[in-house]
């Protein structure tokens, strides 16, 4: 088994449990990713394989790795990010992976669903490809709107007509340049053009598509890609050692606990963190603020008396104490909260965050505050609503049952072991749409 992942936490963490299960079963596993993840990879029993031709930006923020991205926002930020972080890095990844396969002839390739170098390698060699979604189900559907728009499921013909119109506009206008970039990159590595929609013309569909969540937290579709399985939650491995911060005992006090986090990559403190901290300063709650990446925390100071700030606290230890989580909509964080029955306030940023927020709203597990509506009063009202309206907690508890009753690593390993059988059952050239 060859695992290949984009060198960013959200694309790597979900695979730790699967890699551990595969090595436990006796499979030989090698893992191609960024150097910063070497120790964690080796802890799973897999052999670490470094990136040489591929761009290793692991451990750096987006602006550190791609300084020209600083200041970008909205659709432009999304398109430039996809182009530079995922498309243009794929040829280097492909060169590394093909060289690796020469000395390690893998039976399967398991990759996050945006590690396109791995996708190209599968296409060139015929080795079955397994995707693990690093976020929501990203493939298009007539029953859902295009990615990035935060639209809910389409339950009537008019909405499906709207979806078709939006997809056409995206392909021909707003995403036309990204679609052309995918064609260019495929030609660069000697692969033919795919006559599919934007964001789907970079890679063929995988043989198996594993989504690290549950169907109850996803929109219903009549046209899921063949080989798609919702396997349950994947939350990484709890750290062996945990030194709790000095304020840890306060979590067991009488005050409700509100966790505020922007995940590991977002770094604009003014967009959500600053107004959220101010909004809850006079509330009778304990606020735990985790800053994740390198933030200008000076802009958060002085902290109100009810706020405790840390760069990182393991969710395995923190979430059992949390009553409400406020987040920008990172998929892994949202699923981790739901696995503990924690309802949410989502303030979506860019990329797929609006789509994650739409699923939170659809599933009834939280409140969404749209970016233009962010004020101290709107955030305070959202937290109060989620904290006091039991409907959100009850629904989150129901999703938690689904997530925790799914043995995701075992389910994933079972499916991966059957991938060759599945490959034999589909037409040459990949999964038909």
Image: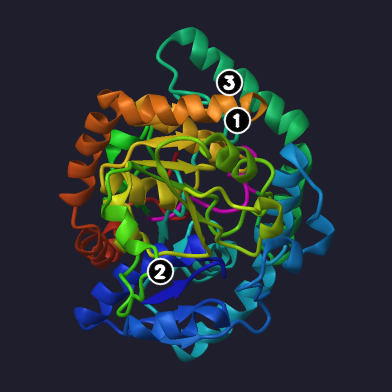
Judge whether residue 202 is colored magenta.
yes
Q: Considering the image in quadrants, where does the N terminus appear?
A: bottom left
Pointer 3: what residue?
A: 164
Pointer 1: what residue?
A: 376
Q: Quadrant of residue 85?
A: bottom right
When the figure is inspected, residue 346 is found, relative to residue 295, above or below; the finding is above
When the figure is inspected, residue 378 is found, relative to residue 209, above or below; the finding is above
Q: CA distance from mark 2 to mark 3?
A: 51 Å
Q: Position of residue 237 (x, y in %)?
A: 31, 70
Q: Position of residue 409 (x, y in %)?
A: 25, 63
Report the front residue among 134 and 250: 250
Q: Residue at x 30, y 70 (%)?
A: 238
Q: Badge 1: few (under 14), some or many (20 or more) residues near its Cα, within 10 Å?
A: some
Q: Identify the magenta region.
A: 194-208
397 horizontally vs 82: left or right = left
Report the front residue among 327 and 88: 327
335 horizontally vs 125: left or right = left
Q: The residue tagged with tag 1: helix, strand or loop? A: helix
Residue 211 in view in this figure: yes
Q: Main secondary structure of the magenta part?
A: loop
Q: Residue at x 56, y 85 (%)?
A: 50
Q: How many marks?
A: 3
Rendered image: mark on residue 245: 2
Q: Position of residue 367 (x, y in %)?
A: 44, 27
Q: Quadrant of residue 375?
A: top right
Q: Position of residue 218 (x, y in %)?
A: 36, 35
Q: Nearer the viewer, mark 2 or mark 3?
A: 2
Q: The residue tagged with tag 3: helix, strand or loop? A: helix
Going from N to C along the chain, the mark reached first, 1 or 3, is 3
């Amino acid at each position: 088994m060859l695992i290949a992942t984009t060198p960013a936490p959200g694309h790597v963490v979900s695979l730790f449990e699967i890699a551990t299960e595969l090595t436990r079963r006796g499979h030989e596993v090698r893992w191609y990713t960024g150097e910063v993840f070497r120790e964690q990879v080796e802890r799973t029993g897999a052999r670490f394989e470094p990136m040489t031709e591929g761009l290793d930006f692991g451990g750096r923020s987006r602006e550190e790795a791609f300084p020209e991205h600083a200041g970008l926002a909205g659709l432009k930020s999304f398109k430039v990010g996809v182009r530079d972080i995922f498309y243009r890095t794929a040829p280097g990844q492909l060169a590394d992976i093909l060289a690796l396969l020469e000395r390690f002839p893998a039976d399967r390739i398991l990759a996050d669903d945006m590690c396109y170098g791995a996708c190209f390698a599968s296409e060139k060699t015929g080795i079955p490809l397994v995707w693990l979604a690093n976020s929501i189900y990203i493939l298009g559907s007539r029953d859902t709107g295009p990615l990035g728009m935060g639209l809910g499921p389409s339950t009537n013909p008019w909405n499906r007509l709207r979806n078709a119109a939006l997809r056409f506009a995206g392909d021909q206008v707003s995403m036309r340049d990204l679609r052309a970039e995918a064609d260019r990159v495929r030609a660069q590595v000697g692969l033919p053009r795919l006559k599919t929609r934007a964001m789907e013309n970079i890679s063929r569909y995988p043989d198996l598509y594993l989504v690290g969540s549950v169907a109850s937290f996803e929109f219903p579709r009549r046209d899921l890609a063949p080989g798609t399985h919702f396997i349950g939650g994947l939350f990484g491995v709890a750290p062996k050692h945990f030194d709790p911060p000095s304020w840890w005992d306060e979590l067991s006090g009488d005050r409700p606990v509100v966790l505020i986090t922007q995940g590991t990559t977002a770094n604009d403190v003014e967009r959500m963190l600053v107004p959220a901290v101010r909004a809850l300063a006079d509330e009778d709650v304990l606020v735990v603020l985790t800053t994740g990446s390198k933030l200008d925390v000076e802009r958060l100071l002085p902290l109100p008396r009810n706020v405790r700030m840390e760069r990182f606290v393991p969710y395995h230890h923190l979430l059992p104490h949390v009553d409400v989580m406020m987040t920008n909509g990172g998929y892994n964080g949202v699923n981790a909260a739901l696995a503990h029955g924690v309802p949410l306030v989502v303030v979506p940023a860019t990329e797929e965050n609006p789509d994650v927020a739409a699923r939170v709203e659809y599933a009834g597990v939280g409140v969404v505050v749209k970016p233009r509506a962010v004020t101290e009063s709107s955030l305070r009202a959202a937290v109060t609503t989620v904290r006091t309206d039991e409907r959100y907690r009850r629904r989150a508890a129901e999703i938690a049952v689904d997530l925790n009753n799914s043995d995701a690593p075992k389910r994933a390993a079972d499916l991966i072991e059957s991938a060759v059988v599945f490959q034999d059952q589909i037409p040459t050239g990949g999964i038909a749409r």
